[in-house]
Image (spheres, rainbow, N blue to C red):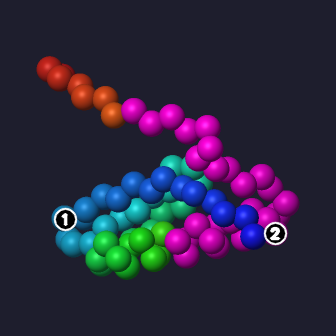
Amino acid sequence: MTVYNYRILLKEEPEGGFTVMVPSLEGCITYGKTLSETKENAKEAIKLYIESLKEDHLPIPTDDNLLEYNLQIDNV
């Protein structure tokens, strides 16, 4: 069994709940009402995304070579 690790980004929504995006999997976005539900929904969305890539014989992107920085921009 192959294990994949992905970075997810969570955005708290004004109406409640969270939107989650998986930057390495373009268009892989889901939503949950709680953090727990959001993380479970993200796992399911990632699994379905990977299954679709496998069915189409496409490469599976990973976060293996991902470098992450947080930039602060002042005086804009």
> Which is more toward the observer, 39 or 20?
39
Q: Residue at x 14, y 20 (%)?
A: 75
Residue that numbered label 1 is attached to: 14
**In what element is the residue under mark 2?**
helix
| One can see residue 57 in this view | yes
Tell me which amino acid carries mark 2: Glu
Q: Which mark is residue 36?
A: none
Mark 1 residue type: Pro
Asked whether residue 35 is drawn in magenta, I would say: no
User: Which of the two residues, 68 or 22, is positioned nearer the viewer here?
Assistant: 68
| Above or below for 69 versus 63 | above
Task: Please report the residue visible at 35 percent of the width from the left and 77 percent of the height from the top.
Answer: 36
Q: Which residues are magenta?
A: 43-69
Q: Is residue 56 above or below residue 7?
A: below
Q: Number of marks in the image?
A: 2
Q: Which mark is residue 55?
A: 2
Disc 1 element: loop
